[in-house]
Amino acid sequence: MMQRFIENALESNWLWLVVRLLLLVIFISSGLAKLIDFEGSLAEMRAAGLHPDWFFNIASAIVLLSGSLLILFDRFVWLGNADWAYQ
């Protein structure tokens, strides 16, 4: 009975959506924080020596949010995953 429940859970689409969402919470929240606390994020970019700070802040937010959405909705996952750049 338990084995059948586990097999059904692992085959369900909703479980994989929830798992992907839980894995991406940190990236989604970071991307949103860069947009919500724009001035704080600009200070972070300046502290890292990135100029123009506004460009790198917006670019970071776009990469974090668009990559997360690609992985979350299971579209072009290879593009949303940063590992391909290091191979």
Image: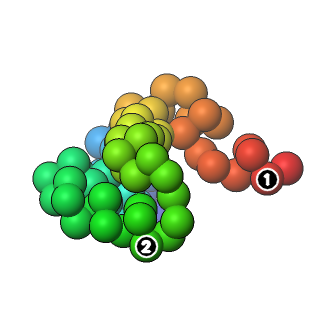
Residue 9 marker? none
- Which amino acid is tagged 1? Tyr
Answer with mark 2 or mark 1, whichever residue precedes in sequence.
Answer: 2
For mark 2, give the secondary structure: helix
Mark 1: few/some/many CA within 10 Å (<14, 14-19, 20+):
few
Q: Quadrant of residue 41?
A: bottom left
Mark 2: few/some/many CA within 10 Å (<14, 14-19, 20+):
few
Residue 4 placement (x, y as % from top left) = 41, 56
49 with respect to 54 (left or right): right
Residue 33 placement (x, y as % from top left) = 22, 58
Residue 31 placement (x, y as % from top left) = 31, 52
Residue reaching furthest to the top: 75
Pick whichever, 19 or 4, lies toward us.
Answer: 19
66 with respect to 41 (left or right): right
Q: Which residue is mark 2?
A: 47
Q: Which residue is mark 1?
A: 86
> How far is the residue under mark 2 from the one under mark 1?
26 Å
Pick whichever, 5 or 86, lies toward us.
Answer: 86
- Say which residue appears at 70% left-offset and 52% top-offset: 83
Residue 71 placement (x, y as % from top left) = 46, 40
- Say which residue appears at 37% left-offset and 57% top-offset: 27
- Which amino acid is tagged 2? Ala
Pick whichever, 14 or 63, lies toward us.
Answer: 63
Q: Are marks 2 and 1 in contact (CB under 8 Å)?
A: no
- Say which residue appears at 31% left-offset and 67% top-offset: 43
